[in-house]
Image: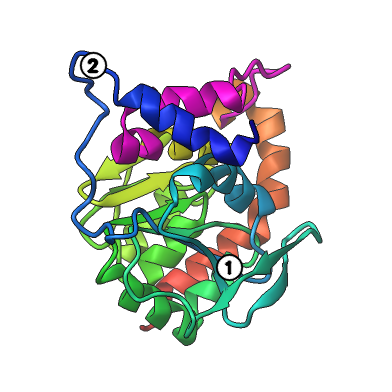
């Protein structure tokens, strides 16, 4: 069985009688008659893993369509040079989708200032059941006015400094649900986000099956995934690498909108 086809088997398993599960939830009110649909924003300078990780885990449940959306259809280059192909431009993206998703990346500050991108997000968010992000994608949502009054997370380098400038309450957690907003921490947290959201959309049995198919059982060689775990020297080096992203995001968040 191909991984993209496992959803049917997983869903059948999810329908077997079982006790109620805390992560399970009814189908969102915005799901179309054709099923769940997902629109994932692509833009120059995005982080490819922010997109590809969630796409891998959520593609199987998007029976109503999975739309990779950019200003223009075609290849979109990530912040490391890997291109992802946009299947739709903004005009071609359905107006009502179940899940609206925004990745982060070095291109975040430019997107926070991009009127066309922000207008697209506001328009699609009005009809979306779930408004979501990974990493600094939450800053783009915030710049569109979509996190004002919400609890949210982001990459550690910008979470506490930038999110408050956008009206959000920063939360130091891997994945944060606040009503229909779902935000995830930096890059690798996209996998946690996708599994947690899959559980809300299709139930815990489906999400657990997706996790096993992906063999998501992380055992990192070093405990260095947070500044506290990494220690001051490593945190300082990482901060230097991320400084342009941080300062650019602060300026973009502080600019009049």
- Name the residue rendered at 65%, 35% in the picture: 2
Q: Residue 208, position in %: x, y? A: 44, 22
Reply above or below: 226 against 251: above
Report which residue position mark 1 lands on.
248
246 vs 193, left or right, is right
Numbered label attached to residue 17: 2
Contact check, label 1 and label 2, Cβ < 8 Å = no
Res. 147 image quadrant: bottom left
Compared across the picture, whether 211 is left or right of 130 comes to right
Kindly tell me whether residue 110 is visible in this rendering: no
In x, y percent, where is residue 167? 27, 62
- Residue 133 coordinates in the image, percent (x, y): 44, 53
- The answer to whether 28 is drawn above or below residue 139 in the figure is above
Residue at 25% x, 69% y is 127
**Part of the protein shown in magenta:** 197-226
Q: Residue at x 28, y 61 (%)?
A: 32
């Amino acid at each position: 069985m191909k991984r993209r086809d496992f959803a049917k088997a997983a869903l059948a398993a999810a329908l077997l009688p079982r006790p109620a599960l805390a992560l399970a939830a009814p189908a969102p009110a915005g799901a179309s008659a054709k099923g769940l649909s997902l629109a994932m924003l692509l833009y120059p300078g995005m982080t490819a893993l922010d997109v590809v990780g969630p796409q891998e885990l959520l593609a199987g449940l998007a029976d109503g369509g999975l739309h990779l959306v950019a200003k223009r259809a075609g290849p979109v280059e990530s912040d490391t040079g890997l291109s992802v192909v946009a299947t739709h431009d903004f005009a071609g993206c359905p107006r009502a989708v179940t899940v609206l998703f925004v990745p982060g990346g070095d291109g975040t500050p430019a997107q926070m200032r991009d009127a066309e991108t922000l207008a697209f997000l506001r328009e699609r968010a009005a009809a979306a059941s779930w408004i979501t992000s990974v990493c600094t994608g939450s800053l783009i949502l915030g710049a569109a006015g979509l996190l004002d009054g919400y609890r949210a997370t982001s990459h550690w380098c910008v979470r506490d400094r930038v999110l408050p400038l956008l009206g959000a309450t920063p939360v130091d957690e891997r994945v944060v649900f606040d009503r229909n907003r779902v935000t995830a921490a930096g890059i690798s947290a996209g996998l946690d986000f996708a599994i947690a959201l899959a559980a809300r959309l299709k139930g815990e049995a489906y999400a657990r099956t997706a996790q096993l198919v992906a063999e998501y059982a992380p055992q990192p060689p070093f405990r260095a995934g947070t500044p506290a775990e990494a220690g001051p020297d490593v945190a300082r080096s990482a901060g230097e690498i991320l400084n342009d992203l941080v300062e650019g995001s602060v300026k973009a968040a502080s600019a009049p909108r």
